[in-house]
Amino acid sequence: MPTDAPSPDDPAADHVLVLEPGRAERHYWRDLWAYRELFAILAWRDLTVRYKQTVIGIAWAVMRPFLTMVIFTILFGRLAKMPSDGAAPYPVMVFAGMLPWFLFSTILSEASNSLVVNANLIGKVYFPRLLVPASTVAVALADAAVTFVLLIGMMAWFQFWPDWRILVLPVFVALAVLAALGPALIMTAMNVKYRDFRYIIPFILQFGLYVSPVGFSSAAVPDQWRLLYSLNPAVGVIDGFRWCLLGGEAEIYAPGFALSLAMVAALLWIGVAYFRRTERTFADLL
């Protein structure tokens, strides 16, 4: 027996789930906004799981970048005698590069397994699946905030302070998130179909740590290779962070930065397109 449906003018009509062929495709991006509360719930849950009832908790977010900074300072600064950016102390220069890298790598590692972890939720109810990997950004930003506080403490120790450029830092934080989301969406979708792909991701991140200018300045790359080196989207992001945080003589290589921006945009478009194309099969595969 048919039931009365609310009229379009009825406020309750916004909360009615309408099932019809192709509706999810046509209204996908509108649904992303409609399910913003679910995004907040997933992000808050990830944060509480990360830091609640843990032995090391925030200490891990401190020790990991600190120990990496010590190793890179000894390896590249002391042994390889590589120059810093301008007048910045070498440990500060390294830490300024690790801040965006750990933000980038945390998003990739957390997002890649997010759909598998939430398999029960995905198989029971409709919502834009893009919300699940996107919600892991909250965990990465929380870790980055802890790392940033540690960086400020290190700057105070060396009596080295940023200038007005630090006001532009939120722009480069957003750029780092966008740079990570493209590859993260590709890895997330592939991990659903090929479960052993999760073993490849740590290797990719470890390799990327050493080929990206984290432990050294990108200015140390020979001029004839610097533009090609900028095909790595992390290069432009790291250079942008150092430009904001180190001030002084720290500069952005404009052609390479433009190329990095293009790579970020291309990877984000490819990531979203691939994720959307494979999204309809997630419930069956999980």
Image: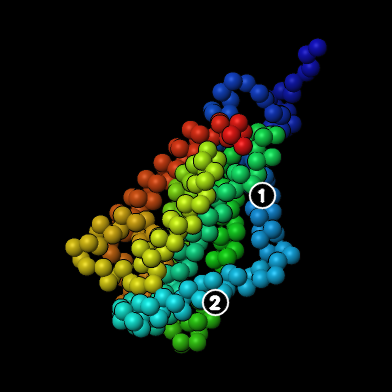
- Res 184 visible: yes
In the structure shown, which secondary structural element does the residue marked by tag 2 occupy? helix
Which residue is disc 1 drawn over? 42
Give whichever of 234, 165 is nearer the camera. 234
Is residue 132 visible from the viewing direction of this image?
no
Taking the spot 44% from the left edge, 77% from the top edge, the residue there is: 71
Residue 150's label in the rendered image is 2
Which colour scheme appears in the figure? rainbow
Residue extending farthest left: 224
Residue pictured at 59% horizontal, 20% vertical: 21
Left or right: 117 in relation to 147? right
Q: In this view, does 31 lie to the left or right of 252?
A: right
Q: Where is residue 221 in the image (x, y as percent from the top left)?
A: 26, 68
Real-space Cα separation, disc 1 to disc 2, in angstroms? 27 Å
Report whether 32 appears left or right of 208: right
- For badge 2, the amino acid type reads Leu
Q: Residue furthest top?
A: 1
- Amino acid type shown at disc 1: Leu
Q: How many other residues sit within 10 Å of disc 2, few (<14), some (14-19) or many (≥20)?
A: some
**Dot 1 surroundings within 10 Å: few (below 14), some, or many (20 or more)?**
some
**Quarter of the N terminus within the rendering:** top right
